[in-house]
Amino acid sequence: MAQGQATKVKKKKKSVLKRAAQARQRAEVNRANRTAVRSLIKKLRGAITAGDKTAAGNLLQPTLSAIDQAITKGVLHENTANRYKSRLNVAYNGLAAKKA
């Protein structure tokens, strides 16, 4: 199903309608969680790119925590999230090495 399209409900059974409503609600929650994680990642990458070590240091732990929560909630796959965390840590450590 393409992003942003409504789920089509063919049958009018009560259970089918309920599952369709639950699917819409879960999709909305997942989208909100995914957006929050991506926003934090973008802020951290922006701070690293700008070379702002203090801002990056302040954003690193909340970002990694949000990624871990996304794994728990099933928004991100574990391997994908671990790849994000690894790359962010490498970038942050490279920034710290440059400043030292």
Image (cartoon, rainbow, N blue to C red):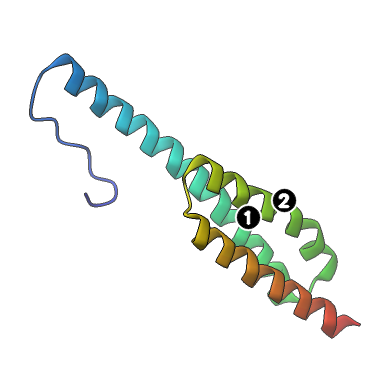
Q: How crowded is the residue under tag 1: few (<14 C-alpha within 10 Å), some, or many (20+)?
A: some
The location of residue 29, given as percent across then percent down, is 45, 36
Q: Evaluate if marks 2 and 1 touch, with contact meaning CB atoms under 8 Å apart.
A: yes
Question: Which one is in front, 100 or 84?
Answer: 84
| SS at circle 2 | helix
Residue pushed farthest top?
14
Asked if 11 appears above or below 98 in the picture, the reply is above
Residue at position x 23%, y 52% in the image: 2
Residue 40 disc label: 1
Q: How crowded is the residue under tag 2: few (<14 C-alpha within 10 Å), some, or many (20+)?
A: some
Residue at position x 24%, y 28% in the image: 20
Asked if 30 appears above or below 44 in the picture, the reply is above
| SS at circle 1 | helix
**In this figure, which residue is indicated by the disc labeled 2?**
62
Among numbered discs 2 and 1, the one appearing first in the sequence: 1
Amino acid at circle 2 = Pro
Question: Which one is in front, 74 or 25?
Answer: 74
The location of residue 75, given as percent across then percent down, is 47, 47
Find residue 10 and report its image quarter: top left
Amino acid at circle 1 = Leu
Asked if 53 appears above or below 4 in the picture, the reply is below
Drawn side of residue 20 relative to residue 93, left or right? left
Residue at position x 71%, y 69% in the image: 89
Find residue 55 and report its image quarter: bottom right
The location of residue 40, given as percent across then percent down, is 63, 55
Residue 17 disc label: none
Residue at position x 50%, y 49% in the image: 35
The location of residue 100, given as percent across then percent down, is 91, 82
**CA gap, disc 2 and disc 1:** 8 Å
Asked if 70 appears above or below 53 in the picture, the reply is above
